[in-house]
Image (cartoon, rainbow, N blue to C red):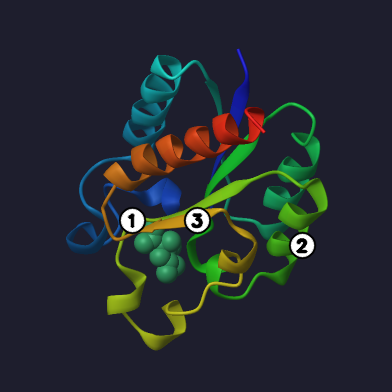
Amino acid sequence: MPAILLVNGPNLNMLGKREPGIYGSDTLADVERLVSEKAHQLGYQIITFQSNHEGEIIDKIHEMREQVEGILINPGAFTHYSYAIRDAISAVSLPVVEIHISNVHARETFRHQSVIAPIAVGQVVGLGIKGYELALEGLVHYLQSQDRE
Ligand code: DQA
C-alpha cells in the first residue's frame, strides 16, 4: 500500500486539552485514527508523526522521502516562520497539503502568514479536525491526477 506521512507540529500533542474553544475536544489520537481510517478506504497507509521540535520534523521529512508519496502537515506555529521546514519540504520534492484546525485568518495578524503555503499543493483551514480528512482527499486526488499524466 502506498504511504502518506501525517506530521503534526508543536503543541498539537495537547489537542483535546489545549484551548478547546479554538481547537475542539478531539485528541491527536482521534485525528490520527480518523485520517488512518479514511486513508485505508482510499488505498493508502498513514505514517503519523508529532513533534514539538523543528529539527525533529525536518529529520522525519528527510527520512521519509523515499517511503511516502506525499505529506499532510499541520506545522502549528512553525507555519508562520519556519523557513527550515519549508526548505525541508522543497528538498524532498514531495507534494504537501497544509492543514489548520482553526481559521488562522480570523485570528492574530501573525497567524495570517504561512511560509509553507507557497510550496504547498493547497491548504485546508478553519474546518476543525474534519480538515485533516479533506486534506487527505485533496492530496490523494492530486497524487492520482499526477499518475494519469
Ligand atoms: C494551528 C494554527 C497555528 O497558528 C497555531 O500556532 C497552532 C495550530 C491550527 O491548527 O489551527 O498551533 O496550526
Foreground: disc 1 or disc 3: 3
The residue beneath circle 3 is 122
Q: Does the residue labelled 2 lie within 8 Å of ligand 1?
A: no
Task: Say which of marks 2 and 3 sits in front.
Answer: 3
Task: Say if disc 1 is inside 8 Å of ligand 1.
Answer: yes
Q: Quadrant of the C terminus?
A: top right
What residue is shown with label 1? 101
Measured in 3D between alpha carbons, the distance from the residue under mark 2 to the one under mark 1, in whole angstroms, is 23 Å
Which amino acid type is marked by label 3?
Gly
Kind of residue at badge 1: Ile
63 relative to 83 in the view: left or right: right
What kind of element bears circle 2? helix
Q: Residue 87 carries which label?
A: 2
Circle 1 crowding by C-alpha within 10 Å: few under 14, some 14–19, many from 20 = some
Looking at the image, in which quadrant does ligand 1 appear?
bottom left
Do residues under tags 1 and 3 come within 8 Å of each other at their CB atoms? no
Q: Which of marks 2 and 3 is nearer the N terminus?
A: 2
User: Which amino acid type is shown beneath numbered disc 2?
Assistant: Asp
Q: Position of residue 15 (x, y in %)?
A: 34, 49
Residue at 35 percent across and 71 percent down: it is: 104
